[in-house]
Image (cartoon, rainbow, N blue to C red):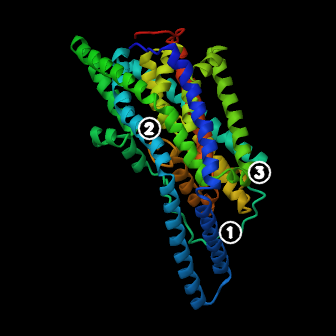
Amino acid sequence: MEHTNTPKTKTRLPLYILVGLFAGVLLGIVLHTNYLADDNTALQTFERGVQEITSQLSRESDHHARLLLEQQHKDLSQQHTAALAARDKKVEPFSLLADIFLRLIKMIVAPLVFTTLVVGVAKLGDINSVGRIGGKTLAWFLSASFMSLLLGMIMVNVLKPGAAMNLPLPDLHEHLDIERGDFSLKSFLYHVFPSSVIDAMAKNEILQIVVFSLLFGVATAALGERGHVIIHFFDTVAQVILKITGYVMSLAPFAVFGAMTAIVAKQGPGILHTYLTFISEFYVSLFLLWSALILGGFCIIGTRVLSLMRQVKEPILLAFSTSSSEAAFPKTMEELGKFGCKDNVVSFVLPLGYSFNLDGSMMYMTFASLFIAQSYGMDLPLPTQLTMLLVLMLTSKGIAGVPRASLVVIAGTLATFNIPEAGLALLLGIDPLLDMGRSATNVVGNSIATAVVSKWEGALGYGGPQSS
């Protein structure tokens, strides 16, 4: 499969994305301070009212008074929800730019994963090759995931970002409208093995698509000469989808502009000041994770890991700007091919990485869970923290397609360790800002993983158009 891209597009698209990023931030600040000023003031009033009533409820013992307070709490919450919807409506045109772009990307992901993985596996030739590469891939993924979780645990214990919060323990019945990511062997296996490949593609369940594609690819290889027709067909389809990707990517600067405008207009620059310590400490931790991943890559592929970072800067920037590592998937696949990774390895490792190797998200899970515990003054002993780390290793796998996936897993983890789930409210406002960093980190981790496995397989060339 050939990878083509004009130098003009390659050099200008990252520039246009940056322009869209900064233009969105500036317009967002203007809208926040003018167009949405009344809406934000009303929302702050409702939020303060809800907090005051919640505090009164925790002290009130009279049954009749509690009923009155609970009704006031319900009324204020409904008014807050209505005001939030009205504010979101005002910036909807900007959100639509990002939403349409992400929908177009999601439209591409399932057929791209299926076609490239079938071709890649079929060209490997036999199930032994698939098992060998799969074993090496999972070994790297598990090591990187454990390192990410452990580094998150170490950094949150060293920096203690939640210690300054000094929050009282909330009402145990208070909860947020976030589904828990409870783990069971049955639910995990159901998530891995599709009952319908059409349904898996419709829902963009990457892990299920990978399972079907592996079986399809191995069966195609087993046909021998007769399978070459199928390989040629899917190879051509993959090239068509990559061509569509190029068309969709031209919309990226507009999507970035819309996403940043909507986020900053709603949250305002003030959110940065309120949580500046937490945000800065989390990004310092992500920087250390990047360094560790790059060092790991250096041990396997040498100084070429730096060239790899330059090669994938565009998908990294795209993932950061849109808060979606999925948005960068097609571009990451293309850039890894240009770097010199063979298509059959890229199409095998990268889709698996999107289910098993979300390094930025993994770090965030331990960092955020322990931050919330610190905020309520809960001192978790080291054995408990290590148990939490192992639980997260299991519960975090294969949930990449779930909206707000990290928060879903964190909610389940908090419940497991009796940490107040209401603490997630501390993160909801700044989650889009944190998601930008962890999405970019996911792209870095998967890019390095693909290059490393390519090196181990003797399938790492020196870039340029290639056919495999």
- What residue is rendered at 71% in x and 52% in y? 275
Q: Is residue 436 left or right of residue 165?
A: left
Q: Is residue 381 above or below residue 79?
A: above
Labels 3 and 2: the sequence-earlier one: 2
Quadrant in which residue 219 is drawn: top left
| Horizontal side, residue 231 vs residue 167: left or right | left
3D distance between C-alphas at marks 1 and 3: 18 Å
Image position of 433 with respect to 1: above or below: below
Question: For the residues carrying marks 3 and 2, which lies nearer the camera in this image?
Answer: 2
- Extreme left residue here? 226
Left/right placement of residue 305 relative to residue 325 reads: right
**For this view, does 242 lie left or right of residue 46?**
left
Q: Nearer the viewer, residue 267 or 333?
A: 267
Residue 1 locus on image (x, y percent): 38, 14
Q: Identify the residue at horizontal 63%, vertical 61% (top origin).
A: 423
Q: Earlier in the sequence, mark 1 or mark 3?
A: 3
Identify the secondary structure beneath mark 2: helix
Query: Residue 101 got which mark?
Result: 2
Q: Amino acid at mark 3?
A: Lys
x, y percent for residue 165 = 75, 60
What residue sits right under mark 3 in the picture?
Answer: 160
Q: Separation of disc 1 and disc 2 at Cα?
A: 41 Å
Instruction: Name the element at disc 1.
Output: loop
| Front residue of 130 and 459 | 459
Mark 1 vs mark 2: in front: 2
User: Which residue is labeled 1 in the image?
Assistant: 169
Disc 3 residue crowd, few under 14, some 14–19, many 20+, Cα 10 Å: some
Q: Earlier in the sequence, mark 1 or mark 2?
A: 2
